[in-house]
Amino acid sequence: MVKVIGVGAAPGLLTDQALREIERAKTVYGSKRAIDMVKNQIKGKKVVLTNYDEIKNKKLTDEDVILSTGDPMVLGLGYLGDKVVPGISSVQLVCARLKIDMSNVCIINGHSKDEYYVKNELDKVLSIKRVAIIVGRPKIDIAKILSDERYRDLDLVLLENIGYPTEKIIYGNKNNIQKITSNLAILVVKQKDE
């Protein structure tokens, strides 16, 4: 049985269940960032993966775990596991920081997507009067996505390094929002007064 464990979006966001699974694991697989976040809790062997395709050919036992930053089922590695232990996602942190009800949110997966794809998904979200949370694309060109005049009345919030000491929350609109400078950035797009 392959276990995928969510380690949270930043240090200090590990659940008790995830902690127990990590402490019991004989071998812990994960990205450098994921392993660094929980390195003090790992008692077994640590294996840093640079590509998760590496894990597909390994025979994992019940004593092995795969770490996923955030929550494995929010743009994470949950698809790799037979058992998934949730973590606190960056989306949950964003909603908490901005006091946004998660039932009013649509997440846009920006991983390996271009601005055209993100813009198309954003249009769908805004058409149903929801808040868009764009995750997963470092250095996305916000100006390119919001170039159309129809986006002039939207509120934007750029969150960088959420959960870390260097966390920044920047409010603006399409004309004054700053460029993304972090690999850990999330953009919230909403209609005014939502």
Image (cartoon, grey):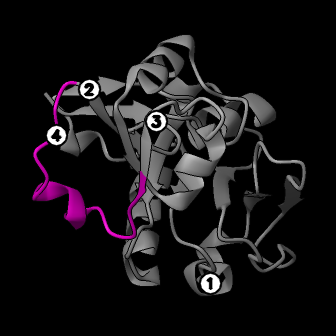
Task: Return the disc, 2 or 3, that comes first in the chain's sequence.
Answer: 2
- As measured in the structure, the alpha-carbon distance from the residue carrying label 4 to the one carrying label 2 is 8 Å
Q: Position of residue 47 (x, y in %)?
A: 40, 54
- At label 2, which amino acid type do we have? Glu
**Residue receiving disc 4:** 60
- As measured in the structure, the alpha-carbon distance from the residue carrying label 4 to the one carrying label 1 is 39 Å
Q: Residue at x 50, y 28 (%)?
A: 87
Q: Residue at x 73, y 30 (%)?
A: 12
**Residue receiving disc 1:** 141
Q: Nearer the viewer, residue 188 or 11?
A: 11
Q: Position of residue 79 (x, y in %)?
A: 21, 43
Mark 3–mark 1 contact, CB under 8 Å? no
Task: Return the disc, 3 or 1, that comes first in the chain's sequence.
Answer: 3
Q: Position of residue 44 (x, y in %)?
A: 44, 34
Mark 2–mark 1 contact, CB under 8 Å? no
- Find the magenta span and give its range: 47-62
Q: Is residue 9 visible?
A: no
In this image, 172 relative to 88: left or right? right
**Residue receiving disc 2:** 63
**Residue receiving disc 3:** 71
In this image, 54 relative to 111: left or right? left
> Mark 3, mark 4: which one is toward the viewer?
4
Secondary structure at badge 4 equals: loop
In this image, 80 relative to 68: left or right? left
Q: Nearer the viewer, residue 161 or 157?
A: 161
